Structure formats: structure tokens, C-alpha cells
Amino acid sequence: MAPERTLAGAAARAGFTLLELLIVIAILAVLVSMVLPNFVGSRKQANEAAAISYMRSWIGAQELYMQRYGLYADADDQLVAAGLIPGGGDKHGYRFSLDNPPNSLYDWWGRGDPIEPGRSGDRYFFIDATGVIRATTTGRASRSSPPVR
């Protein structure tokens, strides 16, 4: 009978106490709170890099569009329909638009704005026919915004 009591006593003591579980949960909460801001910051940087890359694709696409049709596209959907760039519209946490007027023969420009400022990206981008991408963190970017480095 003694061995049964020892076995039963060991079974009753198996597992974790409430205090031990609370300590583990507290440690995990501290670790998550340290890692989460880095993750969000990395995601914003990745979104911004993808937005810049996508807008740079407009440079060659607009020149090819001009050679084919004799004018610049006034919407990135036109560049997509012509097979000059992939996709279009909102992507990578940004909303893209070509803003030049229809039938533009001499100039084009466009923007990339974060869909959720502060979450999907911090910078607003502008590009024109010069191929220089400009950015600002204080609202819509324009020709007077500083260039991206």
C-alpha cells in the first residue's frame, strides 16, 4: 500500500502552480512588448521600399506608353492595361495615383500615399517625368518635397 500512496502523492503534485503560470505569462508579455514595435517598424520600411520600387516602374512604363500612344497615361490602370506594369491601385499599404491631366503630351506626375498613415507607412511620395521620387512625412508630397535618398 505504501507504493500506491507515493504514486498518488506524486500524481497530485504534477503540473504547474498558478504562480508559476502567471510568471511565465508575464515574461512572455514583456518579450512581446519589446518585439512588436520592431515588427511594425520593419513592416512600414518594407511597405515604403515596395512603394518606391513600384513608382520607379512608372518611369519606363510612361515612356513606352508615350511611344505607343503619343501621350502619357493619366492612370496607372492604363499602364497595367497596356501590359507595362503589373497590378495597380492599392498595394503594399499604399494608395497610388497618376495625377496628370488626360492627354498630357509633355509631363506626368503621380503619388503614393499611405493607406493608414503611421501604420502602413510614414512617408508620402511624389514622382514626375524627371524620375526623381520625393517624399514628406507631413502630408501629400509634391515637386517641392525633398528627394528620397
Image: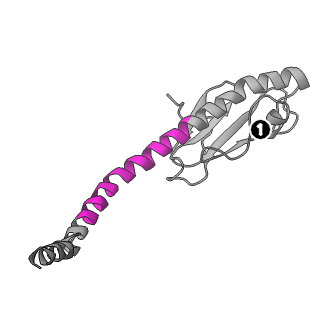
Q: Going 75% across and 41% down the picture, which residue do you hit? A: 99
Q: Residues within 10 Å of mark 1 (few under 14, many from 20)?
A: many
Image colouring:
one colour
Residue 149 part of the magenta-drawn span:
no
Residue 62 to residue 92: above or below? above
Q: Is residue 133 left or right of residue 13?
A: right
Residue 128 to residue 14: above or below? above
**Which residue carries the number 1 mark?**
76
Can you name the residue that lies furthest to the front here?
A: 1
Instruction: Tell me the magenta residue range.
Output: 24-49
Q: Amino acid at mark 1?
A: Asp
Q: Going 54% across and 35% down the picture, which residue do you hit? A: 49
Q: Position of residue 55 (x, y in %)?
A: 66, 33
Tag 1 secondary structure = helix
Residue 73 visible in the picture: yes
Q: Nearer the viewer, residue 118 or 92?
A: 92
Q: Position of residue 93 (x, y in %)?
A: 60, 48
Can you name the residue that lies furthest to the right here?
A: 69
Q: Main secondary structure of the magenta part?
A: helix
Residue 44 part of the magenta-drawn span:
yes
Q: Position of residue 26 (x, y in %)?
A: 26, 65
Count of labels in the image: 1
Can you name the residue that lies furthest to the left here?
A: 2
Q: Is residue 146 left or right of residue 37?
A: right
Q: Going 70% across and 38% down the picture, which residue do you hit? A: 110
The N terminus: image quadrant: bottom left
Q: Is residue 100 left or right of residue 134?
A: right
Q: Quadrant of residue 100?
A: top right
Residue 144 visible in the picture: no
Q: Position of residue 143 (x, y in %)?
A: 63, 34
